[in-house]
Image (cartoon, grey):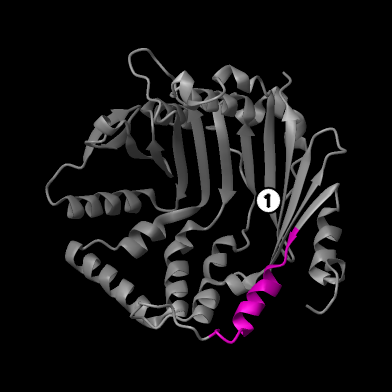
Amino acid sequence: DDGKSLTDNQSYTDCFDEIGKGQARIFFNFKGGIRAILDSKSNKLKIPQNPFGIETNGLIQGLGLDGLNHLGVQLNAKSKELEITSSLGLEHRKGILSFLATVKGSLENHEFVSKDVITVSNARNDMAQLWPTIENTLKSISPALHLLVTSQIQAFEDQSEVAIRTDLLGSLGDEVVSLSYLNEITDAATNIESPSSSIYAIRLKDPKLFGRTMRAMIDSVSKGNELFEETEYKGVTIRSMRGLEAAGLSIAYAINDDWLLVSMGQLQYLNQVINRMDKGKDSLWDSSFMEDAMENLPRGIRQVDYVDFSKMFSLFEVMIGAFDEGDIEFQPKDFGDFPYFFLGWTKDSDSGLVSKAKFYPFSE
């Protein structure tokens, strides 16, 4: 509107001074767009059909969206490995942006991550702040909505004698690892609807308190019905939700040492993680093909992400194979081979978050 070019935007300049310009760039000016909404004549517009008096401005500021400054992305195709670098600029880390609060300590690449994963996301994030963040966000959006939600939770806690907020959510730690695997397909059971399995591992500050509270909450909700079937593997109790087999689903959880493990898919991968937590060796991070990629990781990172594109294409083949030949114009074999993996990292910066990802060839 004022006739200035994007290059006159200080955030644009600072962003690409920090991450480099590359051969291609994308820039989103969140600050300008959100400011225009907040300053518009309708900034006091109430959201229709809500009894809590939530206004547009209150929703944006309560969620913390006014803290978004920019997102800049650059692509560098000149290097040996294709690079993608991004910068998320933040004015503050309130509301839902509290989930991006700066972290302390070093990121540990755990030995229970095996080579057969499709994807891995390993992050430092204080999960114990989950409820305080939600509560503060609700309070900022609408005090009436906050009162309703907290009173309902308090009523449940009083009735069940289970302190969900302090004993359950408050026992969560500051490490979260998500893993996905390509399911083994057999002639006896081919589950096309669920071609992959996922494991979520969350570090616990107080595993015993979390376990007691989780069981008490489930007992309170089930009211005498056995929602979970208990089995034991290598001394670890695994609780699997009943009644999902007919739908081709499997959900289970276990607590091993100071980790909460949640499984969605084939239980063999949960067993594998439990095994590797006990005798972890020859992990993904120790693989010879990862050597150069691991050496490129900087200090002070808060998250590492990995994708095996060779297995990802196999996943697509399984999904395409579920269709009849006449329904689609290409076949699984049309995907070919893509023997590359992706490794990316994220770290805190003075202005927000910086991320970089590279594509590497598999080479043993």
Mark 1 lies on residue: 346
Q: Position of residue 301 (x, y in %)?
A: 68, 50
The single residue placed furthest to the front in the displayed view is 326
Q: Secondary structure at mark 1?
A: strand
Q: Position of residue 92 (x, y in %)?
A: 64, 72
Q: Is residue 91 visible?
A: no
What quarter of the picture does the N terminus occupy? bottom right
Q: Is residue 199 visible?
A: yes
> Is residue 224 shown left or right of residue 43?
left
Q: Residue at x 62, y 24 (%)?
A: 310
Q: Residue at x 51, y 47 (%)?
A: 176
What amino acid type is highlighted by mark number 1?
Thr
Stretch of the chain drawn in magenta: 27-43
What quarter of the picture does the C terminus occupy? top right
In this view, 188 is above or below 257: above
Q: Position of residue 131 (x, y in %)?
A: 42, 65
> Is residue 35 shown left or right of residue 240?
right
Q: Position of residue 244 (x, y in %)?
A: 26, 35
Q: Nearer the viewer, residue 102 or 85?
A: 85
Q: Residue at x 75, y 45 (%)?
A: 84
Q: In the figure, residue 260 lies in which quadrant?
A: top left
In this view, 362 is above or below 239: above
> Is residue 230 shown left or right of residue 103?
left
Q: In the figure, residue 336 lies in which quadrant?
A: top right
For label 1, the crowd category at 10 Å Cα-Cα, with few meaning under 14, some 14 to 19 and many 20 or more, is: many
